[in-house]
Amino acid sequence: MTLNEKIESNVIILPNEVDIKDLLELRLPNPKTGFEIYYWDNIKKRMLHRSRVNFNKAKTWITNNRIHKDGSYYIITEVDVIFVLLYIMEKCGTSQSFIEVDTIHMNNNYQKEGVSGSIKFLLSQDDILNNSIIKICDIKEFGTTKLVSLNTNKVLEYFQKKVEHCKMEYKQIRGLMEVSQVEEAKVELDPPLVEDIRVVEIFGIMCNYLSPVWVDKLSTHLRISEAKIRIDSTQEIANELSSISVRDYMKPKLTEVEAKPVKVKTVPKAPKGSQSITNFFKKSK
């Protein structure tokens, strides 16, 4: 089945500028699912990722006179090829030593998983070799032979720049933290806190494309734990203030001791025929 036939047999949402005739389907390793379907755009030299969206109940599609049994639909969007390359390099051991690029696809794990051919194609692209791999790897060349090794500092520096770029594009804080407002009192988000919130959110999105090893490294590099502590502490203050009513200031609450009713002790009446206690203090005539 050709790519056109595969796309025609499913309901797919993709950008207007994408021409399916220019796409080559690739099956590549993914740190979350094992492997995913990607597409390489031969004209614009970019990587596209296919995501499947399922419904809770079984569905089918009818387009013109054709019935599609697969009731799910797919979304094809551009993805940073660095995420794909990082996992390929990590899994074949380039973080420990230099490995010849032309032999990476021959890794036993890749051959067993059926992704060897797609990796070989991807790493043979001039744009990947000359512009992408160099961003995260150290490279040694001996004639026509090229060896690569993952450089942790390069990787973290690349993702740091990516976070900074995403912060510039981050127009809204969607549901990250509401500004608490109680009548005339409110808690406002200060710029440093907004910065923390955005970094944590962007980091969370990037984690979807990273292995646990790189999630930990990037978390430490971006100081995510410290940012979360600042966010949580501010949220606690906001929650405390939101529980305060203006009436609490108008009518001060009594303390526990003051709030208890005072019991008045009564003196029992003297029995009939007995002398009053005041008679003992009267002078005798």
Image (cartoon, helix red, strand yellow):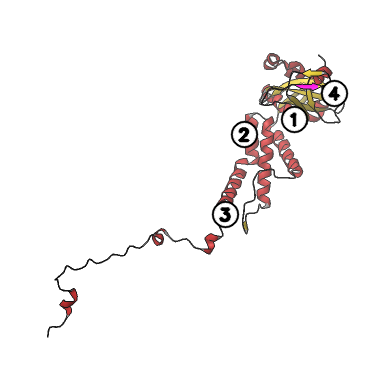
Who comes first in sequence, dot 4 or dot 3?
4
The residue under label 2 is which amino acid type?
Asp
Q: Could one spot residue 207 in this view of the protein? A: yes
Q: How many C-alpha atoms fall within 10 Å of the one at disc 3: few (<14), some, or many (≥20)?
A: some
Spatial CA span between label 1 and label 2: 18 Å
**Residue on which disc 2 sits:** 216
Q: Assess whether mark 2 and mark 1 are in contact (beta carbons under 8 angstroms).
A: no
Who comes first in sequence, dot 4 or dot 1?
4
Spatial CA span between label 4 and label 3: 55 Å
Who comes first in sequence, dot 2 or dot 3?
2
Q: How many C-alpha atoms fall within 10 Å of the one at disc 2: few (<14), some, or many (≥20)?
A: few
Which of the two discs, 2 and 4, sits closer to the camera?
A: 4
The residue under label 1 is which amino acid type?
Ile
Q: How many C-alpha atoms fall within 10 Å of the one at disc 4: few (<14), some, or many (≥20)?
A: few
The residue under label 3 is which amino acid type?
Leu
Q: Which element type, helix, strand or loop, lies under badge 2?
A: helix
Spatial CA span between label 2 and label 3: 34 Å
**Residue on which disc 1 sits:** 82
Quarter assignment of residue 26: top right
Which of the two discs, 4 and 1, sits closer to the camera?
A: 4
Residue at 80% x, 26% y: name it: 128
Q: Which element type, helix, strand or loop, lies under badge 3?
A: helix
Image coordinates for residue 243, horizontal then vertical, percent: 55, 53
Q: Is residue 210 above or below residue 172?
A: above
Q: Assess whether mark 3 and mark 2 are in contact (beta carbons under 8 angstroms).
A: no
Who comes first in sequence, dot 2 or dot 4?
4
